[in-house]
Image (tube, helix red, strand yellow):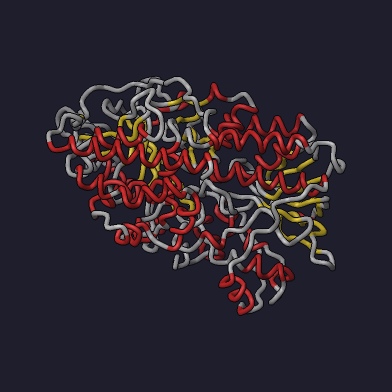
Amino acid sequence: GSPRLAADREHAMAGSVLLLAAASLGFSGPTRSPVKSRVASVSMRDFPKPNIENTDNYRTSTALTEKIKSLAGQGGSKNVAIIGGGLSGLAAAKYLVDAGHKPTVYEARDILGGKVSAWQDEDGDWIETGLHIFFGAYPNMMNLFSELDLHDRLQWKQHRMAFAMRDAPGKFTSFEFTPGVPAPFGMALAILRNTEMLSWYEKIAMLPALLPMLLEGQPFIDAQDELSVTEFMRKYGMPERINEEIFVAMGKALDFIDPDRLSMSVVLTAMNRFIRETDGSQTAFIDGNQPDRLCKPIVEHVRALGGEVRTGVPVRSIELKEDGSVAALLLDGGERVEADMYVSAMPVDVFKRLLPTKWLEPASASAEFFEGIEPLKGIPVINVQLWFDRPLPSSLDGLAFSRSPLLSVYADMSKSCREYEDADGRGVMEMVFAPCTIEAGADRDWLKCSDEEIVDAALGELANLFPLEIAPDSRTAASPDGAGGERALLRKFAVVRVPRSVYAAVPGMGKHRPSQETPISNFVLAGDWTAQRFLGSMEGAVLAGKLAAEVVASRAAGVPTQGVKAIEHSVVVSSHEAQPRKPPGVLGQNAVAFGGGASFSKKVTDELEVFDPAQLVPLG
């Protein structure tokens, strides 16, 4: 066998031996971690940057950076038009200027960042599209921070995974990682030391599923894409409590969806990274708003090397030449943009609306490719921010899994992010409200509910997590406790709806994710929904943009590329059977129309009813 396979077997056997040995200790409980009550006041504390560079994935990412740079000067400098100024489009531009090309990013909105965009309210507080966390297992994002010298902007938190106790209001438990314990022992030991969530029997019952993942790696993970999490659990005889205690929280955090609708390959991809990489599951917060602290340095780098980034310039159509290649982009107001190469970094739902009809002509190679993406659809999510009138003493410094029916993960940003620290210590809670539609697993369509209904539901969940600090009627009550008023009152709130966020990773979608390279000679795809190893995430977005830049730079230099991703037979057959159609184009002028999130107004709602009345089509 190869050295890599031998190492994988060693990791698998080591993890299994440790798991079996330590699990047997569960009878007497010497490794027991007591449930912690939320009583002591917690303050912000940052930890040293972990040794994220010492992984194969980080080295692979570094090698890709060097490859792209090495192509500079080969084949001449190309003008490249990039549609979309989210992380993927900005990453593509960054790596293209590194390779000596001249990209221009065309962003429809007035702000950059896409799904990590943020804007200020009348008080100067930042309204965020989502609660975004950086993991040690984000090699391309970490490389980007290194290349732009931004690592001092990451606030690394204690290495743990904290979970609220579902049946014990006001208490939580954690998987605590011991410093210096290498992979795969670190994750195994963290799980085994906690006996509040899974019994020793349930931990052992996970082994049959984890061993093939560790032994076979990505091929095994990819092969599970046709199974939901619950189907996979039944196949391997995993107890239901593993789903209730672990997978529900992971599913909602990874893709805003319940486990019976989520592809198991998503969960296994995350678990594989966390188990194999010593610091893979350690988290960090950026020290302020992402448009200023992350997007702005990328823009400055691009402009310094001859590129450009434009905002407020929606692309309304893609014009073609006779041979089907791109002739130009038509912008709002009639401006026509010509370039040597074109990159789409738009969200999948927006891209499908701009697809040229010619690329969908039945039985053509382009139709086989582009019809294949039709089943991909964005998943809805809601981000809620709550500003309280006093500190929340027991909220954590860092990310926590709520494990409640409505909330995915949350963080007290006043303790986790330097820019959001309140001068008076008042709590600022940010949380992911998911699932939020019936198709994703909710009991109603929360996207169509009022802001007040959403906030009251979130407060009800938080009151279970912090019963001594937050009352369920904190929004409306003058004093939730009557005499004394010791629990926090809500000062203000923000609700940001993203009707179509990251692609819905329901079973079977992996085969529909396209390569960055397309059958069109001068057109390349980016975006976290395209084929890459890191899911729909910030890491996936950066990697996809980097891979798109590699395709453009390689074609310009006459260097062989990876080629267009092979299309499965079933997808080819479906494309041949598809009826000719004309994509409708992008309608509307608001953030939601361009795949972003917004605090809904009547204008936004009215436009949404026109161009996306179903909010979310059935996921299948």
Which residue occupies the foreground of this view, 476 or 63?
A: 63
**Lateral position of residue 204 relative to residue 286, left or right:** left
Q: Is residue 75 above or below residue 187?
A: below
Give above or below for 603 relative to 8.
below
Q: Residue at x 68, y 35 (%)?
A: 65
Number of labels in the image equals 0
Q: Nearer the viewer, residue 365 or 439?
A: 365
Picture quadrant where residue 489 is located: top left
Can residue 492 be seen at all in this image of the molecule?
A: no
Which residue lies most toward the front here? 1
Q: Is residue 379 left or right of residue 141?
A: left
Expressed as whole percent of the image width and height from the top left, the position of residue 70 reads 77, 35
Q: With respect to residue 20, does 485 lie above or below? A: above
Q: Is residue 231 visible?
A: yes
Q: Position of residue 56 (x, y in %)?
A: 54, 35
Q: Position of residue 219 (x, y in %)?
A: 50, 53
How far from the left and from the top, in percent, is residue 470? 24, 35
Quadrant in the picture for the C terminus:
bottom left
Q: Nearer the viewer, residue 177 or 476?
A: 177
Nearest to the observer: residue 267 or residue 491: 267
Residue at (17%, 37%) from the top-left corner? 26
- Locate residue 415: give its quadrant: top left
In the displayed structure image, the side of residue 475 where residue 440 appears, left or right: right
Residue at point 65%, 40% (across, down): 91
Tell whether 174 sits left or right of 599. left
